[in-house]
Image: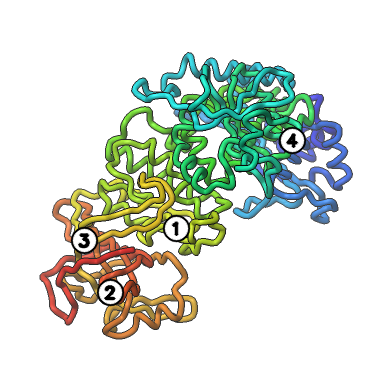
Amino acid sequence: MDPRLCSICRIVFEDPEHAQIRDPNRPGHLRHDYFASGVHHKSAKSFWGAVDCQCPICVTLFLNYSTSAALPLDDPTANGYTTYNIDYGCGDPSSKPPKLPRFSINFFVGKMNFGPSAPPYLKLLSLHPSDATKTLAPTSTTTDLHHIKDWVQDCISSHPTCRPPKAQSFHYPTRLLRVSQPGDASIQLIETATTPLNGPYNVLSYRWGTSQPTTLLKSTLTSFLTSIPLSTLPQTLIDAVTVTRAMSVSYLWIDALCIIQDSPSDWAHEATTMASVYGNAHCSLAASHNTDSTGGLFPRRLGSGKGRPITIIFPSNCEWDIPFHEMQLVEHNFWNNRVEDAPLNTRGWVVQERILAPRTVHFGFDQALFECRAARKSMTRFDLGIEQRHRRLILPSKDMGKEELTRYWSAVVQFYTGRELSFVGDRAVAIAGIARAVQGGGRYVAGLWEGDLERWLFWEGEGTTKGKGTGDRKGSGGYRAPSWSWLSVDGRVFYDTDLIQGFRYLRTGIHARVVRWRIVTADGSGFGEIKAGLLELRGVLWVAYLEKKGKEVEAKLRGHELTGTGLGEWVLKGDLSWSWDMEISDAMAKRSEGESGNVFVLPVLEMTPTKDSEDACLYALAIERVDVGGRSDVYRRVGILTVFGTTRVAPKDEGLDVKKTLVKLV
């Protein structure tokens, strides 16, 4: 049995009556597929004592839980401070492919809880014997730095996908920090346009927290160009200098010290260069486990064996004589607990920082981990490989085709919009670097792409609300983006992959075509802060009105129910699905009433699954007329309507306007 385990953890695995996983009818065998649960530590005092003694299970449970929630001081349940459940499957080597024995155990603070809002728990999974020899010994901070340097050099020499395209010209950021030599008590800000440079630079990815004590301001620019004492910086920035020096890299880029924070014009210019800043970096240093800049990069080393597999010994074999005498248990969510679910990676800005950087070192709560476009590694585990979810977000090293762009960009949008921004007005700017780096999609249109623009209009929000500009940076004026862009809403956004990628459809009809579009950005590049946007489509408008019944919204068309009603050349007989970009107010519903209401439906796309099928899927925009200088042809998007199963019929005139008109969306 692993000597690092506390007495309570040992009991879980050693006591047959406690663990209840051995078959009482067949001595020497484990039970077939079995599930058991029980009390782990009965009191908080017992648990904290095990943490103090460096029990690897209890320490890991503590670290996983405490990254996002405060551990209760008292016993959370009458049954025990911590609990566990065991899930065992004996396996079947005769199946094809062979089903190997598996053993997993989950530990919880309080009662067992797998719900979506449940606090983090620890899941240990049995390691396949062939992987048990690929683990690494625990290391000190000094040897961690050697590992980091080796990881980066191996990536540069052996991963072609991590190298920038040869045609891409190398550019230094506007300003960099010269980190000098190890032991120096200061660093220096340099302006790259007037300073001869030689060699690569690192970048720091971190969370500021509620404040940043030392920043580059107009008033500090001159002094920073002379010297910046390390003693004036928070610990995370000091550690970034230490790591950069240990990697024999001469320069470092940190946003707080390289962008003039009280200059809106400098910030706006630098924000549009992030594709170059991160794309040309030698390595990104990510303070993944910290919520502010004071915690430092180097992890809390609770125990010398954190992260290593835990050895469990059973005095038995399973039914098919597969040796189960010794088993190695590892964290099931080893990577997610330290990287994907870490505080840093909840930030919207970090999405493009991770995607654009050729390689990143994540400083997790207990060790450093490495990520590039070809591999993922850690200090105490074998090569972690690249999961499919991670692979979908890797920036291709070549121009994208139309099909590849739709897959890639829709995945990026969903991933990005699920993250937080301190300033909601940054929504357009914080993804601009990725948009600049993506090629092959035509011109960029406020989060959408000109190629197949009619399809890109059909994004759908998950509990979204129209952005009101709260939390915008000073000088932004509160405007976010035009209503037809997902940049105009708060919350997660996703695309229907069937629609955007054309899966399952053999024929596509476009009923409202884009006539022209115009986006005005602060810097004129089309990628920066958006000042105004206009989209013109020509199509048929169906007058609709909304009726509120409590919180429910019922959409009607001139007094007729939408289903089974002739709409020009359509009969909508299928399932209707409305998705609103905002909560429909009583005032908005009232404005939509009657023959001259303000709410309309604009059919845009018809998708037919087979060549001869009469049934189709109709995608339409829900729009509301807005008052702009007394004009009657200006609208804003308020949602989308999807009709699954429509039948085309001969045009009918039921008093509905079937004449195509020019619609201007703002």
Q: Earlier in the sequence, mark 2 or mark 4?
A: 4
The label on residue 480 is 1
Earlier along the polypeptide chain: callout 4 or callout 1?
A: 4
Query: Which mark, by number, is residue 631?
Result: 2
Q: Amino acid type of disc 3? A: Ala
Q: CA distance from mark 2 to mark 4?
A: 57 Å
Disc 2 residue type?
Answer: Arg
Q: Nearer the viewer, mark 4 or mark 1?
A: 4
Mark 3 or mark 4, earlier in chain: 4
Q: Quadrant of residue 569?
A: bottom left
Occupied quadrant, residue 479: bottom left
Q: Is residue 184 left or right of residue 278?
A: right
At 50% across and 31% down in the image, what residue appears?
A: 173
Q: Find disc 3 in the rendering and name its residue.
A: 512
Residue 232's mark? 4
At numbered mark 2, what does the secondary structure look like: helix, strand or loop? loop
- How far apart are the alpha carbons under marks 3 and 2? 21 Å
Between label 3 and label 2, give the one nearer the viewer: 2
How far is the residue under mark 4 from the one under mark 1?
36 Å
Which part of the image, by quadrant, shows the N terminus? top right
Foreground: disc 2 or disc 4: 4
In the image, residue 537 lies at what x, y percent? 23, 61
Q: Amino acid at mark 4?
A: Thr
Disc 4: CA contacts within 10 A as few (<14), some (14-19) or many (>=20) = few
Secondary structure beneath dot 1 equals loop
Q: Given the image, on which type of amino acid does mark 1 rest?
A: Arg
